[in-house]
Amino acid sequence: MDALLSLRLRVEKSTRAAGDPSAVLVQKLANAAELAFAERNLLFNDDRVLLDQNNESRTRQSVKNTIVGRAKMMEYADIVAAQEKRDKAEARSKGGRGCKRKRKTPFLVAESSGSAQCKELEQGEREIETSGLEGYCSVLRFE
């Protein structure tokens, strides 16, 4: 393409200097050649795109299909029922998530012994609960 462009420039210079009436014909010939090369390049690009698309479809066809599940036609009422069912299942499973609540009962060591320490722990927890300060303070347990 560059060679054609340089040849065209040389022809234009020589025809301007000569002042021939055939210069118009030479100019038309140069324009036609340039147009032909441009169209050829466009066709090559189109062919390359089509070849890539063809190779892509062959690759897709060679991959084995995996069946994930079965599809079925659903009405709006079926969709709403399925959504409610899913919401109920999520509500049941959400019990284990989030922050753990503080234990209401003392640890096993304190539960098993009926000592004064156990009674003192229970009394402290009751005082905190009655005053409504469960979120702000707690009883320390040393084991």
Image (cartoon, rainbow, N blue to C red):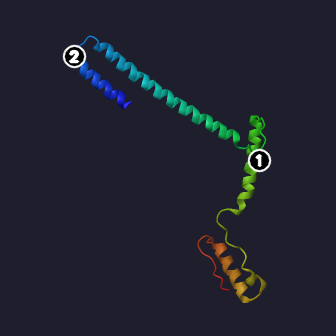
- With 64 as the anchor, is 25 left or right in this view? left
Near-viewer residue (12 or 117): 12
**Residue at image x 71%, y 80%?**
122
| 116 relative to 22, above or below | below
- The numbered mark, 1 or 2, whose residue comes first in the sequence reads 2
Residue that numbered label 1 is attached to:
85
Q: Position of residue 2 (x, y in %)?
A: 36, 31
Q: Position of residue 86 (x, y in %)?
A: 74, 48
Near-viewer residue (116 or 94): 94
**Residue at image x 64%, y 79%?**
139
The quarter of the rendered structure image containing the C terminus is bottom right
- With 66 as the anchor, is 51 left or right in this view? left
Residue 18 image label: 2
| 90 relative to 136, above or below | above
Q: Position of residue 59 (x, y in %)?
A: 65, 41
Amino acid identity at mark 2 = Ala
Near-viewer residue (109 or 36): 36
- With 26 as the anchor, is 39 left or right in this view? right
Q: Quadrant of residue 60?
A: top right
Q: Secondary structure at mark 2?
A: helix
Q: Position of residue 15 (x, y in %)?
A: 25, 18
Residue 38 image label: none
Near-viewer residue (124 or 88): 88
Contact? badges 1 and 2 (CB < 8 Å): no
Amino acid identity at mark 1 = Lys
Q: Secondary structure at mark 1?
A: helix
